[in-house]
Amino acid sequence: MTDMISQNLVAAFNDSNIVKANVVLVTVEMNDSSLEKVLAKKLLSELLRVSGSNHKAVLELTEEDMEAYIRTLKWLRVCHVNEDRTEAFRAYRNIVKYLHVPVLYYQVLIGIGRAYDREYNIEFRPCYSINEGDILGTDEMAAISSILRQYEAVKTVEGTPRTREGELDFMAMVHVDNEIRSYRTQTHPVYAFLAAFVRQQKLNEVTGSMSRVVYGFEEDFKYHIDALFNAIDGGAET
């Protein structure tokens, strides 16, 4: 009797229409990460190694300069994705396509962007809070870019990504203390490594409780940078 009631109950709803709820917008904060510091140190070390004492401009560079360069690239990427029309961003529009981006960090910038999860009807958008004084000026960016361009040992891509789309598996990652998690179960662990460069720390009300799959640990990923620094090809231009 119970099974018959259940079958009839299910049959009564067979013709019901299932309608998706409105798209939920999730803003993902691209916070600064300790891995950016590690990458900046590695970049400077490599530049010093290949230039020796022959390049005054390289000798004058600091790890803080390289870190600021990387983070300004991130700021430029987020501004582009969000179609920023402020005067601050407009000043860079003529140089972003010429700035040289270290290949490893270019993979991070590709991930940053608009992403849409059709299954859950969630749209992800990046944002980035940075102090105005921490953004390098156009002349400073051009000078460091010129140095990167000169040395083939540091593989680079010319120009930041021009599309506004990011990668869903990247944008859906979230940091919980030292863990990099996602609610998506079929994501390749490489996205956790790339996401470790931007600490998506804010557990939002939409995906926070869903992010139960642990893909890696930030501290562990620091040791991958040396191994991957020269191994990633990524279509680099030098």
Image (cartoon, helix red, strand yellow):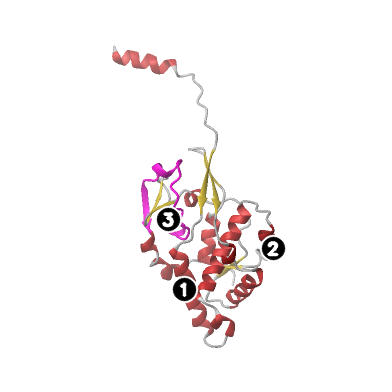
Residue 176 in view in this figure: yes
Give the secondary structure at mark 2. Answer: loop
Q: CA distance from mark 1 to mark 3?
A: 21 Å
Please name the amino acid that badge 3 sits on: Ala
Please name the amino acid that badge 2 sits on: Ala
- First in sequence: mark 1 vs mark 3: 1
Badge 2 local density, few (<14 within 10 Å), some, or many (20+)? few
Badge 3 local density, few (<14 within 10 Å), some, or many (20+)? many
For residue 5, what is the image quadrant?
A: top left
Q: Residue 51 lies in magenta, yes or no?
A: no
Compared with residue 3, is residue 38 higher up or lower down, i.e. above or below? Answer: below
On the image, numbered disc 2 is attached to which residue? 91
Where does the magenta region start and end? 193-217
On the image, numbered disc 3 is attached to which residue? 192
Numbered disc in front, either 2 or 1? 2
Between 232 and 142, which is closer to the camera in this rendering? 142
Please name the amino acid that badge 1 sits on: Lys
Numbered disc in front, either 2 or 3? 2
On the image, numbered disc 1 is attached to which residue? 41
- The residue at the far left in this view is 1
For residue 123, what is the image quadrant?
A: top right
Q: Is residue 78 left or right of residue 3?
A: right
